[in-house]
Image (cartoon, rainbow, N blue to C red):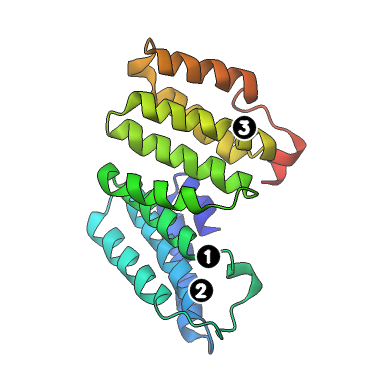
Amino acid sequence: MSLQATYQDKPADALALVSAAQDQARAAIGATPRVRAMLAMREAFAHATFGDRTATHIAISEAHSQYGRITAGDPDPAWVTYFDEPKLIVDTGIAHGRLGEAAIAEPLIADALAREESANQRGRAFHAFWLGRTQLQRGKVDQACHTAIEALVPAAAVSSERVTGHLHEFYEQLAPYREVPAAVAFEARLRAVLPPQGQRTPSSIRT
């Protein structure tokens, strides 16, 4: 729920939710380092949405510190097993990207995306969007558009309303470059592959 609040631009709600979850984890006997690392990263997202650089960096550091304590025998609950090293890396990059620290974010997201399971199409689409966004922040318009085009096929395959919204958001960020051939190519592919923003499919409603 904290992550959903972050994506809905409700950082105060996100921070309150993740703080409550962290309090429960600290009070719980047997809360694993992986759980604590995941919660710290969600806290970083909320702080980054606020634009609080110091708090974001502290939360990122805590996430990595907790992740470093993970052992093979930890009794992780099933719902947190997705939070592996590539996920830690890509989330670190996204947190930096939310702060506008694109030079830090880009190589982290690119590294994690290269290690992403090909079957995880939703993750690949979402993370490719973030890679394209950081590349655009750095003025790499052609490269950013190429990356975003690569996100379109997996995005269409999973029909995620959130991912579709992010890719339409990327299109809006291309406004200053609308006549650049790479941006024209992205717009054409976007219109061909994904439904207009706000058009919901049964699978997107469940996402």
- For badge 2, the amino acid type reads Val
**Disc number placed over residue 107 in the picture, else none:** none
| Pointer 2 residue | 35
Q: CA distance from mark 1 to mark 2?
A: 8 Å
Q: Is residue 190 above or below residue 114?
A: above
Mark 1 or mark 2: name the one nearer the start of the chain. 2
Are the residues tagged 1 and 2 within 8 Å (C-beta)?
no
Q: Is 34 left, or right, of 178 in this rendering?
A: right
Label 3 sits on what residue type? Val
Residue 100 at least partly seen: no
Q: Is residue 20 above or below residue 166?
A: below
Measured as percent of width and height from the top left, residue 73 is found at 56, 86
Residue 188 location, quadrant: top right
Task: Count neighbours of disc 3 (C-alpha within 10 A) and say few if under 14, some if 14 to 19, many if 20 or more.
Answer: some
Label whose residue precedes the other's in the sequence (1 or 3): 1
- From the image, tell me which residue sits under label 1: 83
Of labels 1 and 2, the one closer to you: 1
